[in-house]
Amino acid sequence: MSHKLISLNHDLKRLRDEGYAIEIRAGYVLLHDVPYVNAQKEIKYGILLSTLTLAGEQTRKPDTHIAHFVGEAPCNKIGQEITQIKHGVGRTQIAGSLVADRSFSNKPGSGYDDYYEKMNRYAVIISSPANSIDSSVTAKCFKVIESPEEDIVFNYMDTASSRSGTTALTAKFESKKIAIVGLGGTGAYILDQVAKTPVQEVHIFDSDEFQQHNAFRAPGAPSLDYLSRGFKKVEYFADIYSRMHKYILPHPYKIDVENVAELYEMDFVFVCVDDGDARKLVTDALIDKGITFIDCGMGVDLTDGHLGGILRITVGTDVKHDHTIGKLPFANDNLDDAYTQNIQIADLNALNAIMAVLKWKKLFGFYRDFEQEHHTTYTIDGNLILNDDASSNDDELTTETDDTDEVA
């Protein structure tokens, strides 16, 4: 992807053609081997980098004039720091082992028109003192950077993470296999969020057709023609989200005793079913295999012309799952009244899904998690969130590998 993007864009290609050691990585453009003078008046080499703004595979005007640098503070030829471009000092993890040491600010009146103008300008400022000491020293070394051919899970580069500075955090999801069991309203919104993370695979399980009523409580807006074709839910959603994520894998059937073992290869499972027996089958199997899951549910009722009720997410891990017996509705003939209702509203499905995804990201270490709760409810009419079943101090909740979702 690095060499392809460089070849397709005149500004990136010009940097390469003029001899800069350019690389595209994790939503950033990098110039390697940029010479500079340090405080000891020694010539050193660093990496200059900037976030990359793209529209598909085409570069756009840089979204910021700020640049980052891997190396010591660049100085003039007598060892005095070039303070005119100084912006921030402090280590910032960019992606993997790439850590920036500082940032620079040099803003033209109207900003930079393209990445050649931006990167070349910073490279000249940084490297000129080194070149004045030794005229053979230059950032235009015509060195080819061989970027490793990664198995990129997206069909286009994730520039949102680089722009927000969360690339290193987002990498926590890489190589994970995630399952969503049930693509009702909540499960579909969970897919919408998970598909935008770099998980290796997203397996979606559901036997139902995508019907007209589903369209009113699911992400997206299908056409009438599309609804008339009788697609399975998993086929419909796989078609949509495979446009972004390469590995959305549809399974057009329910999980039952014959195929539940398909979940054993997963790193995390969102359970999104409205059948108590199916919930028990799936969660019992996941607990037995030590696979972390989140089960989501909602009970909504219509009283005196208004809707009210409760949304719920419940986490089960290999360390803590004893609470699930009392918190998950299992037997279909003994469900509380709140869980026998089948009122599903799109905004409630979306909120239930977001609750689950936020917790999933906490479990993987993306967000801070002070309480480490395993059961959360949201009461609609009181706008009340309650946490329960927190981990004890002796529990070791793995924050790099877990999560699950949905309904009741």
Image (tube, helix red, strand yellow):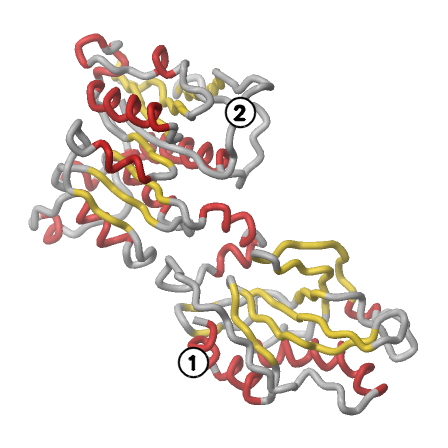
Where does the image place residue 46, in percent across and percent down from the top left? 71, 71
Element carrying mark 2: loop
Q: Is residue 332 above or below residue 34?
A: above
Where does the image place residue 196, in percent across and percent down from the top left? 39, 50
Give the residue type that dot 2 points to. Gln
Residue position for label 2: 372
Where does the image place residue 230, in percent across and percent down from the top left? 8, 46
Location of residue 181 by image quarter:
top left
Give the residue type that dot 1 points to. Leu
Residue position for label 1: 8
- Quadrant position of the N terminus in the picture: bottom left
Where does the image place residue 328, in percent across and percent down from the top left? 32, 17
Q: Give the foreground label among 1 and 2.
A: 2
- Quadrant position of the C terminus in the picture: top left
- For disc 1, the neighbor class at 10 Å (few under 14, some 14 to 19, many from 20) is few
Q: Nearer the viewer, residue 370 or 230?
A: 370
